[in-house]
Amino acid sequence: MAEIRIEHVRKQFGSFVAVEDSSFVVHDGEFLALLGPSGCGKTTTLRMIAGLELPTSGKIYLDGEDVTFNRASARDIAFVFQLFALYPHMSVRKNIAFPLVSQGVPRAETRKRVEETARLLQIDHILDRSVSGLAGGDRQRVALGRSIVRRPKCFLMDEPLGTLDAEFREVMVHELRELHNRIHATTVYVTHDQHEAMAMADKIAVMNHGVIEQFGTPQEIYAKPATIYVADFIGSPPMNIVRFTSGLQRGARTVQLDGVDIAVPEVHEDMPVGELALGVRPEHIRFSDASPLRGRVYGSEYLGTDQVVTVETSSGKVKARVPANRSFNLGETVGLEFNHSKLTLFDCRSGRAVPSSINAEARHV
């Protein structure tokens, strides 16, 4: 397997910029998820890594070799598409073997590698069946097997679970991660589903309008969002964003919200007067009768072991994740306390997090 390095890659189609100045590294054996909504540039980025699109500018390195303008066939990569593109008239065995047959690999070696791959994917019992009659999950395994059997330097996957129903998709998320752990393949995986990315990836690149908003581990991106966009995109429910107008000086440890002083992580630079926002995850809010920050219960969503309670304050609605056994009445007034060590401040003009003791290490690309 190999390291993938992207340096200042840009892709423009006419007057439309699909990818803008992207740089990141996928280390040997890492699983990277390119995450974002439709049209954000994630598939275009993947296609440039594969050699199916050429960048307008920038460099792409695979295993230390500059492959920016190499054809896809010269890059030793395997691409798994959303649509399986299997040969319906062939058996599972022949579909998996097809890349090796095309390369002229000896018959005995082909048979050995196909059977090894089938065992790895737990489909060795259906090798001689036609793919046309298989369920979606098994068809996806066959498509993966056809990529794995070649033993390429890296795997590129473009929303490979997008056509599966929710139950199969959940199963395949775990199977793909287990497969990655077994073969240690350098993998780039495109998805719009944050749950897939958070469950499988070692690193995530969150994309928006062709720009990588943040690159980091799932834990970093969840706990230390670099922008309001990332804070709102990651999490279910997403991070609460409470806007207010103020200025901040370096070293500040409190902000005023609804006339109440709220403790925040120490601010590391001066901020002129303007619209700011306080970001807090639902699980970092608790109810306290002693708190001067008040609001009215607007609604509640029961989730089994816990519940998400929506509270309306004078600064807007916030959601709090609390134990399911606590009961609330609609319209009831409650006090809110925030875990100050988990808060993030944002500059609404730039959309970026204000440098502070909580997000000083968050990586913004």
Image (cartoon, helix red, strand yellow):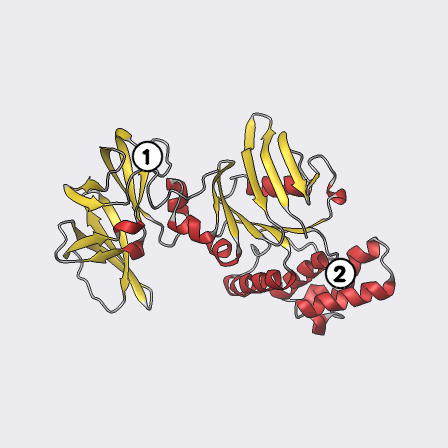
Q: Quadrant of residue 322?
A: bottom left
Residue for point 38% across, 51% down = 223
In the displayed structure, would residue 89 be above or below residue 189? below
Can residue 130 be seen here?
Answer: no
Q: Secondary structure at mark 1?
A: loop
In the displayed structure, would residue 65 be above or below residue 139? above
In the displayed structure, would residue 106 be above or below residue 206? below
Q: Quadrant of residue 286?
A: bottom left
Alpha-carbon distance for marks 2 and 1?
Answer: 52 Å
Residue for point 68% across, 40% down = 52
Label 2 packing within 10 angstroms: few (<14), some (14-19), many (20+): many
Residue with the most extreme bottom position: 125
Give the residue at mark 2. 95
Nearer the observer, 2 or 310: 2
Q: Residue type at mark 1?
A: Cys
Q: Secondary structure at mark 2?
A: helix
Label 1 packing within 10 angstroms: few (<14), some (14-19), many (20+): some
Left or right relative to 273: residue 20: right
Mark toward the start of the polypeptide (2 vs 1): 2
Residue for point 58% across, 53% down = 30
Give the residue at mark 1. 348
The image shows residue 40 at horizontal and vertical percentages of 51, 39
Residue with the most extreme top position: 15
Q: Residue type at mark 2?
A: Asn
The image shows residue 310 at horizontal and vertical percentages of 25, 54
Left or right relative to 228: residue 327: left
Can residue 220 be seen here?
Answer: yes
